[in-house]
Every structure is written in C-alpha cells, then in structure tokens.
Image (tube, rainbow, N blue to C red):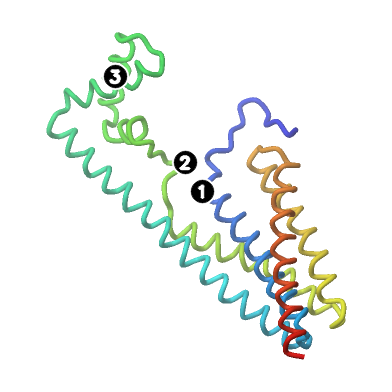
C-alpha cells in the first residue's frame, strides 16, 4: 500500500486532480468504446477514424461545458454563503464570535482557549475564519470554473488521442484488439498515476478504472457487432 511521507498532504490537489483524471479517463474510455463499436459494425478504417475524431471534439467540448457549469454553480453557492455570513458578522458580531468559539470547543479546545482563538481569528479576518471553520470554504477547495473546464477539456483530448493513434497504426481487422489493449494499458497507467499523485492505494485505483473501461468497451463491441450483423 502506498503511504505518503509524514508531513505531505494532497488535499490541495483535489480540484485539478479530480477534473484531470475524470477528463483523461473519459477521453480514453468513451473514444475507445466508440471506435471499437464502430469497427465491430464493419466500418472502414477511415470511417472509424472520422467517428473517433468527432467523438474527441464533441467529448472535449462537453467535458469543458459540463465542468464549467457544475463548478460555476458551486462557486455561486459559495459566494452567496459568504454574502450571508458577512451580513451576520455585521449584524451580530458577538454571536458570531461565540459561534466560532463553539466550533473550536467542539474540536476539543477548552472553552477559555477556544474563546481566545476565536478572538484572534475574528481580529485577523473574521469572514475568512467563518468561511473556513463554519462553512468549510477554504482556498484549497475553492471552486475554480475556468481551471476545471480547461483541465477537463485538455485531459479528455489527451486521453482520446491514444485510441485514435491506435486506429492509425492498426490494420482494419486489428483495430478492436489493438485499441482495447492500448486503452486498457493507458487506463492502468492513469489509475496508478492519479493514485500516486493523490497519495491513495495504487492497486485499487488500477483495478477500478480497468474494470469499468473493459465493461464499456465490451458493451459497445457487442452493440456494434449486433448492428453490423443486422445490417449486413
């Protein structure tokens, strides 16, 4: 099991890492599955390449738009919460100070020390203190829509390029096999890399991404074979 060295933490990476891993994984799985399904239906190499390229462009734009809308909604909620909290601080700073102290008491501090901590935090930056300790909004986990959108689109494109490359170097008959093998290998590498960066167990991540990737490719291969047989 992979264990992070003492003092090293990875929560500050969670925003961009989640978007990047999701984008690359989706790029590999969706594009490879699309290619395998179309190839299994009897399409020519140029037709498979055209469909895969269209899938790359559509998928990258969809990932970017989806991430932007999703993370923007999170950012809107955070902003609205901060506006409300600022109003509470202006209207009743005494109660807000006690609320902050109660939070620290709940974390194990003695009441006197908790009130001292609350006093100092309120004097330094009352809104930031309440945002972090009451609302759970921190700089590390702050919503960044543009960053998430660009990261997702770029990582999707990078992932989707691999099955497209497999089509280019394959003969028409070997497209499904080579695309499947190279894509599963890339998924395994992606799972291991993301687990290493995030400080998580590597084996679990590798098995997880390979299993779901294999199921997706098998499903589209069956659909393509069924349609190809029916239309023949």
Q: Residues within 10 Å of mark 3 (few under 14, many from 20)?
A: many
Classify residue 185 by image quadrant: bottom right
State which tag comes first along the sequence, 2 or 3: 3
- Position of 94 with respect to 20 (left or right) is left
Element class at badge 3: helix
Residue under label 3, please give it. Answer: 101
Where residue 65 is drawn, which disc sits there? none
What is the C-alpha distance between the residues marked 2 and 3? 23 Å
Q: Is residue 6 above or below residue 78?
A: above
Question: Which residue is rendered at x = 70% and y = 31% of the image?
Answer: 3
Q: Horizontal and vertical percent for residue 100?
A: 29, 24
- Position of 91 with respect to 99 (left or right) is left
Quadrant holding the N terminus: top right
Where residue 140 is drawn, which disc sits there? 2
Q: Residues within 10 Å of mark 2 (few under 14, many from 20)?
A: few
Where residue 15 is drawn, which disc sits there? 1
Question: Which residue is rendered at x = 18% and y = 24% of the image?
Answer: 95
Q: Horizontal and vertical percent for residue 122?
A: 26, 26
Residues at marks 1 and 3 touching, judged by CB atoms closer than 8 Å: no
State which tag comes first along the sequence, 2 or 1: 1
State which tag comes first along the sequence, 1 or 3: 1
Quadrant holding the C terminus: bottom right
Task: Tell us which disc is closer to us: 2 or 3.
Answer: 3
Element class at badge 2: loop
Classify residue 4 by image quadrant: top right
Which of 124 and 55 lies nearest the eye of the viewer? Answer: 55
Q: Horizontal and vertical percent for residue 211?
A: 73, 54
């Amino acid at each position: 099991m992979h264990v992070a060295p003492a003092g090293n933490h990875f929560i500050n990476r969670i925003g961009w890492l989640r978007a990047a891993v999701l984008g690359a994984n989706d790029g590999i799985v969706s594009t490879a599955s699309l290619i395998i399904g179309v190839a299994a239906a009897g399409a020519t190499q140029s037709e498979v390449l055209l469909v895969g390229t269209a899938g790359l462009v559509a998928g990258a734009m969809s990932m970017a738009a989806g991430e932007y809308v999703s993370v923007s909604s999170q950012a809107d909620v955070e902003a609205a919460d901060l506006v409300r909290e600022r109003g509470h601080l202006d209207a009743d700073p005494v109660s807000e100070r006690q609320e902050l102290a109660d939070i620290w008491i709940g974390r194990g501090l003695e009441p006197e020390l908790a009130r001292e901590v609350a006093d100092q935090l309120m004097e330094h930056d009352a809104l930031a203190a309440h945002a972090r300790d009451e609302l759970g909004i921190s700089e590390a986990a702050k919503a960044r829509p543009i960053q998430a959108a660009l990261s997702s689109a770029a990582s999707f494109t990078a992932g989707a390029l691999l099955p497209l490359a497999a089509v280019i170097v394959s003969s028409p008959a070997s497209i499904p096999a080579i695309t499947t093998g190279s894509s599963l290998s890339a998924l395994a590498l992606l799972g291991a890399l993301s687990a290493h960066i995030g400080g998580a167990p590597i084996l679990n991540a590798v098995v997880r991404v390979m299993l779901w990737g294999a199921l997706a490719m098998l499903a589209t291969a069956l659909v393509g074979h069924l349609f190809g047989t029916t239309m023949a």
